[in-house]
Image (cartoon, rainbow, N blue to C red):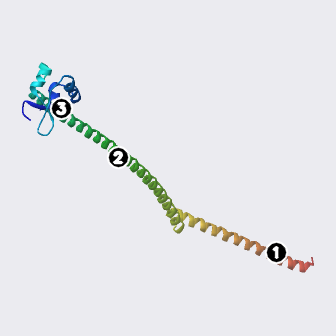
Amino acid sequence: MSSNKVSVSVAAKMAGVSRATFYRHIDEKSISTEQDDKGNKVIDVAELVRVYGNQLKTLEDVEKAEKAKKQKGETRQDSENVSTELELMREKLKNLETERERERKQLSDQIGDLRSRLEKTEEQRIKAEEQKDRLTLMLTDQRSDKEKIEEKEKSQEKKFSDLEATIQELKSQQEKLLNNEKKGFFARLFGT
């Protein structure tokens, strides 16, 4: 395409209208068109100047606008990419926080379970220790020496008192026997 002939797309941009509007203008404003080697419609720039006059943009202006639009599009795309990435990061952070909270709750539950098990184990240990102490007391004399001496003294006193009681009993029986024998002798003598 030569520099004095432009495609329909470029002509529409130079005129500042859409392609559809430009095609309508071709019919309404009798814009003459030609065909290039490939059979595409092309318009002479002089024809565009005739129809649009001072409103017509130059090819340089169209190229600058295209570059600016492309840069703006890239900037918008970059901004959209950053926004999308930011949204993904927020979602990941939210998921991580949710997972962390779930793990924290799970660990808290495990700690609570372990504490209750430890308390039960401690209670069982204390009971076993008490039972062991009772069994040890049953198997061994845990009294102090003073208590042991007092117990022996009480035991000996009881034995002495039992012995005295037995002696008194024997004396009493002996006296009865003697009295019976005396009575028996006098009774025989006197016949009573």
- Which element is circle 3 on? helix
Q: Position of residue 99 (x, y in %)?
A: 35, 47
Q: Position of residue 155 (x, y in %)?
A: 60, 67
Residue hosting label 1: 179
Which residue is found at the position 32% from the left and 45% from the top? 96
- Which element is circle 1 on? helix
Taking the image as shown, residue 160 lies to the left or right of residue 37, namely right
Tell me, for residue 72, which label it has, or none: 3
Residue 50: image quadrant is: top left
Q: Residues within 10 Å of mark 1 (few under 14, many from 20)?
A: few
Question: Is residue 143 among the parts visible in the rendering?
Answer: no
From mark 1 to mark 3, how far is it between C-alphas?
148 Å
Residue 168: image quadrant is: bottom right
From mark 2 to mark 3, how far is it between C-alphas?
40 Å
Quarter of the image that includes the N terminus: top left
Give, as a three-letter code, the residue at label 2. Arg
Q: Residues within 10 Å of mark 2 (few under 14, many from 20)?
A: few
Residue hosting label 2: 100
